[in-house]
Amino acid sequence: MDIITVKDKSFRPYISEEDLQASVKKVASKINNDYKGSSPIFLGILNGSFMFFGDLLKSINLECTVSFVKLTSYEGTDSTGKVNELIGLKEDIEGKDVILIEDIVDTGNTLVKLHEILSKKNPKSIKIATLLYKPEAYKKDHSIDYVGIEIPNAFVLGYGLDYDGLGRNLSSIYVLNE
Ligand code: 5GP
């Protein structure tokens, strides 16, 4: 693999397709074990999780349903100024085991907000699976139940993750070349 240019920045190969697929399979196998006898709902967080979601679900052998949601943020009138809204959830998750599928957990803000919103809908449980996790950037106490690969605090691209909307279609992960 070579260095690539996306828009105005250069990125170098970081995690191979092979390593990604191996860690996706590990996460799937843990979930298969933990949810035996349950019929969970997998909730993919758009846009970034779409590739991880697709590959992960191919290795899930549970009876399950799938859906995708998006967290939007707009300027509101409350004290923090920001209001978050969850769009796309048509399913009733009351009493259900929910597994949130994230591309990457960085500061953890997204995860905590999603958890807050979804908890109000009275699911039986909510667990979080993320392909990538940046422990040095994570600022929350919330446990992250399934982690594919831990990475340092750097900007990565590919396999669903974008730079300014580009690069999501790459089948492996690249890192900003600085
Ligand atoms: P958090 O709320 O945990 O700080 O950030 C989560 C979101 O920020 C991710 O879903 C992703 O969209 C974006 N993000 C965080 N780190 C990276 C990164 O290294 N590369 C890309 N492309 N997006 C990132």
Image (spheres, helix red, strand yellow):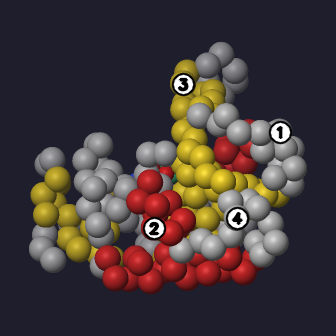
- Numbered disc 3: secondary structure: strand
**Residue behind mark 4:** 63
The amino acid beneath tag 3 is Tyr
Determine whether, in the image, residue 126 is placed left or right of residue 114: right
**Residue behind mark 1:** 120
The picture places residue 115, in percent across and down from the top left corner, at 72, 48
Please tell me the numbered disc located at residue 60: none
| In front: label 3 or label 1 | 1
Q: Quadrant of the C terminus?
A: bottom left
Tell me how far mark 2 sits from mark 3, CA to CA: 31 Å
Q: Report crowding for label 2: few under 14, some 14 to 19, many 20 or more residues within 10 A (C-alpha).
A: some
- CB-based contact (under 8 Å), mark 2 and mark 1: no
- Numbered disc 4: secondary structure: loop
Query: Which numbered disc, 4 or 1, marks the residue that appears first in the sequence?
Result: 4
Please tell me the numbered disc located at residue 55: 2
The picture places residue 7, in percent across and down from the top left corner, at 15, 47
The amino acid beneath tag 1 is Lys
Tell me how far mark 3 sits from mark 4, CA to CA: 36 Å
Vertically, is 173 above or below 110?
Answer: below
Please tell me the numbered disc located at residue 74: 3
Determine whether, in the image, residue 117 is placed left or right of residue 109: right
Tell me how far mark 4 sits from mark 2, CA to CA: 16 Å
Tell me how far mark 3 sits from mark 1, CA to CA: 20 Å
The amino acid beneath tag 4 is Glu
